[in-house]
Image (cartoon, rainbow, N blue to C red):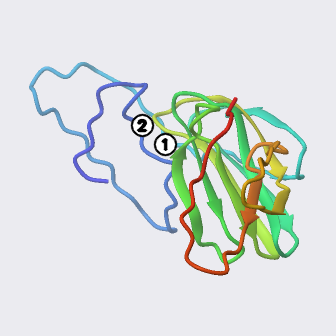
């Protein structure tokens, strides 16, 4: 990083950074002429690795700034999974990597249970990795469940009311109908709760 501000101890941390072996230099300079004395530390954050089991809640906290929690999931082909967030902190982020190491999503907020959940995803066979970390030196607590998602397929009959009862977060309901010729249709939402 270049020209990074070093003013606030709760907002100006950098990292975690993956650095290659070698010698590094950190230069600090006073840009305003009145900088007070300050302290900092360069340290190696903890990486905590845990196997993730579908449908088993996870509740944890990042113990020290920079720590990363790494969850691995052994997926079977075509597993449908929804990352159901219960809560996270202000600075909590998460990243999902496929078995080849490609990011499905990267550095996304994991704070609110109604907007920061992810999925559903159809997983390929292999080891998937979910990383949880916090920005700006935070030590946030979080909780989530990697849920198995069930899909429901149905046949729609024109003119008949269909009641759909979701089977859980991330569940997909799919209905199909066929028309023999061009037909004027109207999709009517009868009731929503």
Q: Which mark is residue 13?
A: 2
Residue at 40% x, 25% y: name it: 9
Q: Which residue is mark 1?
A: 42
Q: Residues within 10 Å of mark 1 (few under 14, many from 20)?
A: few
Which quarter of the figure has residue 175? Answer: bottom right
Residue at 57% x, 61% y: name it: 185
Give the vertical position of 53 relative to 111 (above or below): below
Which quarter of the figure has residue 60? Answer: top right
Q: Position of residue 129 (x, y in %)?
A: 72, 61
Depth check, front residue: 13 or 165: 165
Give the vertical position of 36 relative to 158 (above or below): above
Image depth: mark 1 or mark 2 in front: 2
Depth check, front residue: 21 or 117: 117
Tell me which label, 1 or 2, sits earlier in the chain: 2
Q: Secondary structure at mark 2?
A: loop
Q: Position of residue 3 (x, y in %)?
A: 22, 47
Q: CA distance from mark 1 to mark 2?
A: 10 Å
Which quarter of the figure has residue 180? Answer: bottom right
Total count of labels: 2
* Quadrant in which the N terminus appears: bottom left
Q: Position of residue 124 (x, y in %)?
A: 77, 75
* Quadrant in which the C terminus appears: top right
């Amino acid at each position: 990083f270049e020209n990074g501000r070093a003013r606030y101890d709760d907002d100006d941390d950098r990292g975690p950074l993956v650095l290659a072996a070698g010698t590094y230099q950190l230069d600090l300079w006073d840009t305003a002429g009145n900088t007070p004395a300050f302290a900092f530390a360069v340290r190696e954050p903890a990486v905590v690795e845990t196997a993730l089991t579908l449908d088993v809640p996870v509740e944890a906290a990042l113990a020290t700034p920079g720590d990363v929690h790494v969850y691995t999931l052994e997926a079977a082909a075509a597993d449908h999974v929804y990352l159901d967030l219960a809560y996270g902190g202000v600075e909590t982020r998460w990243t999902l990597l496929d078995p080849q190491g490609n990011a499905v999503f990267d550095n996304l907020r994991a704070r609110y249970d109604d907007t920061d959940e992810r999925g559903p995803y159809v997983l390929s066979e292999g080891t998937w990795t979910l990383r949880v970390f916090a920005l700006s030196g935070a030590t946030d607590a979080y909780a989530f469940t990697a849920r198995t998602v069930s899909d429901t397929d149905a046949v729609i009959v024109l003119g008949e009311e269909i009641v759909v009862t979701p089977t859980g977060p991330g569940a997909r309901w799919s209905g199909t109908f066929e028309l023999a010729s061009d037909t004027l249709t109207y999709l009517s939402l009868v009731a929503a709760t």
